[in-house]
Amino acid sequence: MNNKLTENSILEQENKLYRAIKDSNITALDQLLHDDLLFILPSGQTITKEIDLDTYRDGILKVDELLPEIENLNIIDDMAVITLTMKLNGKFNEVPFEVSYRYIRFWKKFGDGIKVVGGSGIAI
């Protein structure tokens, strides 16, 4: 297996993540997120992979539209750091929302694929 990450491989993973979020696809999210993921939500709460999956599994979050704009993408050995803005709309606990966030996400290459290991989001 080629151990070199490329911009295209990370953008491909990002697109898989966007589809999984929009479709609430737990199987795809489970494959894309590392088991030891840590992510800081815009509220300041730190969540794990299981907390994130439960949000989709329980139907708490439903994303109807997701419009990302990549700002920066740095490849550092077997890790990639990406920053982006994203407009989202959908429902959280059945309450409609329309928001814009700035995210930083960390992707790392493992033997079984490229996975998100961490990140953070803030409202903009």
Image (cartoon, rainbow, N blue to C red):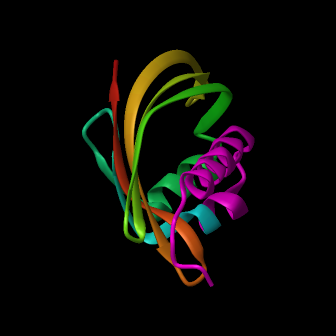
Q: Where is residue 49 in the image (x, y as percent from the top left)?
A: 46, 62
Q: In this view, does 106 lie above or below 19?
A: below
Q: Could you tell whether 37 is left or right of 53 in the image?
A: left
Q: Look at the image and tell me in which quarter the N terminus lies.
A: bottom right
Tell me, yes or no, whether the highlighted magenta stretch contains residue 12.
Answer: yes
Q: In this view, does 28 lie above or below 93?
A: below
User: Which residue sits at x=64%, y=43%?
Assistant: 21
Residue in front for this viewpoint, 6 or 82: 6
Secondary structure, magenta segment, majority class: helix
Q: Could you tell whether 71 is left or right of 46 in the image?
A: right
The magenta span reads 1-30
Q: Where is residue 43 in the image (x, y as percent from the top left)?
A: 29, 33
Residue ranking furthest to the left = 44
Q: Position of residue 10 (x, y in %)?
A: 56, 54
User: Which residue sits at x=35%, y=50%?
Assistant: 119
Residue in front for this viewpoint, 70 or 100: 70
Residue in front for this viewpoint, 33 or 46: 33
User: Which residue sits at x=40%, y=65%?
Assistant: 79
User: Which residue sits at x=71%, y=63%?
Assistant: 27
Tell me, yes or no, whether the highlighted magenta stretch contains residue 21.
Answer: yes
Q: Where is residue 110 in the image (x, y as percent from the top left)?
A: 51, 79
**Residue 41, located in which quarter of the rendered image?**
top left
Q: Could you tell whether 70 is left or right of 75 in the image?
A: right
Q: Is residue 118 above or below residue 110?
A: above
Q: Look at the image and tell me in which quarter the C terminus lies.
A: top left
Q: Could you tell whether 78 is left or right of 89 in the image?
A: left
